[in-house]
Amino acid sequence: MRPLLTRVRSTLVAVIGIVAVSLVCYYLIHVNATIAATVLLLCALVSGVYQKLTEAVIASITATLCLDYFFVPPIGSISIGDPQGWILLVVFLAVSLIVTHLSRSLRKQRDELILRQTEAEKLYALSRSMLLSDGEDVRRLIVNKCMELFGFTEMVLFEKATGQFYRSQTETSIPGEKLQRAALYAEADRNASGHVIVPITLGNKTLGSFGFRGVSLSEGTLQGIGNTVAVGLAQAQAQEAGSRAEAVRKSEELKSVMIDALAHDLKTPLTAIEAAADMLLPPADVAAEQRDDLLHVIQEESRGLRRMMDEAIHLARIDAKKLRLEYHWVSVRDLISAALQLVGDRALSHEIEVDIPDNLPPVLADSELLVQALKQLLDNALKYSPSRSVITISAAEAQGVISISVHDEGQGLTELEQGRVFDKFYRGRYDRSAVQGTGMGLAIAREIVEAHGGHIGVESQIGQGSRFTIGLSSAPKAEEMEPQEA
């Protein structure tokens, strides 16, 4: 209703304007018919530029009638006494209509060019946002960006490869089965109820479909949106396929590295055990003291093998996402004591200092796993610091976070090593020949700590040792909580 009223109003304005111009030319300026025809033709031209064709034709006829009434004899009547007057009016009306039509066509072309430019800018903005998505979900980005750029009231994107729907809102009136059908048969669907569904194709492959409500778009724009979305989806799928392939490749690489590391580090203890066993077998003549030493070697190397196997099993459980935490309230002092017990006699080669405040609150943790994490830090400090040097274990609480640190007096780490020291199988520049190990310990510690919602880090300087710190959320005070299991 409102567009009709607007058109009627604009038509009245044009008619009244032409009549007013005619009155001015006749009563005030007293122009002749030629000048009046030129002025009225200009008025009809202006009307044709700014109005639709019907209104412009009415304006042209009004200008012809005004020219006849005011300037073609007999003046003051809609009649023509002179044949030249007929020629003048017919020519004027024809020229007026032709000019009106041409101006209307030019205006239509201009509007189409503006519309195409606007749509091209929107498509460019859509493609640019997908290109710069920076890890954001491309499907959700497509829906949100289309809603923003094209003014849809609702939109649904269907991806054929995954069978997933991505909706602009929780409930939409666009039927999912029609989206699936459009993706299956690559057919568009314009429904009388107002929704439009368009297939998303790239070459001869259909990637999905999208549907929307709220605006009317040209076929070219719909095709442009479909092509742009198709490129974005294809790129996202290619990246995800590449990531999966890379994950598989890395998994195979990790397996290979792990096998190589275990094979290398198993050789030394196995060689020692084999040599000791050969010396103990009869008819070898071994003194009692030497026999005890050989048995001690077998025992220590066997324990080392068990530690390596335990580390490999822990790492396999972590990689397989089979890590299950059983939470208990536990004191930090008990955790550190248990870790020192696991280290055993190996700690006798160093001076161990423990600094734990008496009022330190407990933590909610899987005590067995967290003890393993602390043991890995202690093992690391024992292996990479000189014999008889001091290893300090400290704990503190600040702003609801309990920090447990292990500080050694070893060679220290470079900045590059600090960034990689928690990676699986990584070993520093002093590790590969001087120190036995698989490079799994710190990776296990990190995974265990992060599974608790905590964090682990390292501070180090070359020649001044390293400090490894675990940060965990502190528990309420002992009198405010009861022991429980999560």
Image: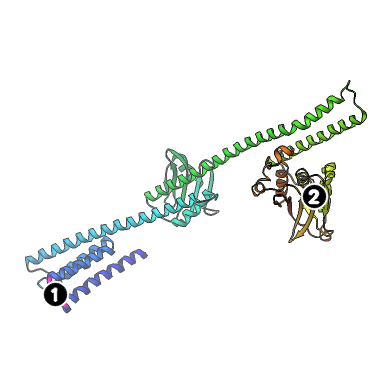
User: Disc 1 and disc 2: Cα gap in Å?
Assistant: 111 Å
Badge 1 marks a residue whose secondary structure is loop
Residue at x 29% of width, y 56% of height: 109
The image shows residue 25 at horizontal and vertical percentages of 17, 75
Hey, which residue is sitting farthest top in the picture? Answer: 283
Q: Quadrant of residue 295?
A: top right
Residue 397 lies, with reference to residue 191, above or below; the image says: below
* Image disc number at residue 391: 2
The image shows residue 270 at horizontal and vertical percentages of 78, 30
Q: Which amino acid type is shown beneath numbered disc 1?
A: Val
Q: Residues within 10 Å of mark 2 (few under 14, many from 20)?
A: many
Q: Quadrant of residue 474?
A: bottom right
The image shows residue 221 at horizontal and vertical percentages of 39, 50
Badge 2 marks a residue whose secondary structure is strand
Q: Disc 1 marks which residue?
A: 31
Hey, which residue is sitting farthest bottom in the picture? Answer: 28
Q: Residues within 10 Å of mark 1 (few under 14, many from 20)?
A: some
The image shows residue 149 at horizontal and vertical percentages of 45, 56
Q: Which residues are magenta?
A: 29-33
Residue at x 58% of width, y 39% of height: 246
Quick one: 228 or 133, which is closer to the camera? 133
Principal secondary structure, stretch drawn in magenta? loop
Q: Is residue 330 visible?
A: no
Q: Relative to 161, is 381 on the left or the right?
A: right
Quadrant housing the N terminus: bottom left
